[in-house]
Amino acid sequence: MSQEADVLAAQDKLKILQLKQQELARQLGTTDFIWNGSISKRFLTCGKPSCPCHRDTGAKHGPYYYWTTKKAGKTVSKLLTEQQAGILQQWINNRRELERILDAMQKLSQEAYESMLVIMEHAD
Ligand SMILES: [Zn+2]
């Protein structure tokens, strides 16, 4: 390819990347509340040795919902009601979606930068 063709290809690519970027920015604009950490659902055994929960998996107590996060490098867990877990799970899903969008934006930006380098290299 000639240098001119390289520049035209880079300009076309940049336009496509800008459209993708705008679409991602639009998705960011619709993001609701977000929450860190993750939620787990657990069935547990109790401290009473005669309780069936120790012998029968189906007799375990629960479900119990825990929210888990890291604070200063330590894992912290908090017991939640089922309703609280439902709300926070949605917010955690929102955060993961936001992180996915940001990650995609950073990859797009890297490609955009490479296209811009080609364009600038051949600019008068
Ligand atoms: Zn038990």
Image: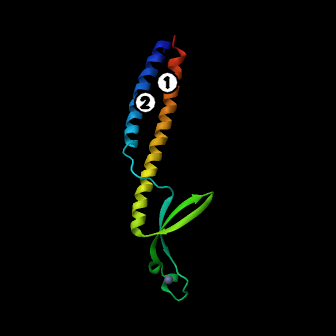
Q: Earlier in the sequence, mark 1 or mark 2?
A: 2
Left or right, 55 with reference to 88:
right
Report the amino acid beneath label 1: Ser
Report the amino acid beneath label 2: Leu
Residue at 58% x, 58% y is 70
Residue 95 position (above or below residue 62): above
Tell which residue pokes out farthest to the right in this image: 73
**Res. 2 visible in picture:** no
Residue 93 in the image, given as x and y percentages of width and height: 42, 54
**Residue 13 image label:** none
Neighbor class of circle 2 (other Cα within 10 Å; few <14, some 14-19, many 20+) is: some
Residue 40 in the image, given as x and y percentages of width and height: 48, 65
Residue at 52% x, 79% y is 45
Dot 1 falls on a residue whose secondary structure is helix
Tell which residue pokes out farthest to the bottom in this image: 50
Neighbor class of circle 1 (other Cα within 10 Å; few <14, some 14-19, many 20+) is: many
Is mark 1 in CB contact (under 8 Å) with mark 2? yes
> From the Cβ of disc 2, is ligand 1 less than 8 Å away?
no
Q: How is the image coloured?
A: rainbow
Residue 113 in the image, given as x and y percentages of width and height: 52, 27
In-front residue for pair 114/59: 114
The alpha-carbon separation of the residues under discs 1 and 2 comes to 10 Å
Dot 2 falls on a residue whose secondary structure is helix
Residue 47 in the image, given as x and y percentages of width and height: 55, 83
Find disc 2 in the rendering and name its residue.
Answer: 17
Residue at 37% x, 36% y is 23
In-front residue for pair 30/12: 30
Find disc 1 in the rendering and name its residue.
Answer: 115
**Res. 63 visible in picture:** yes
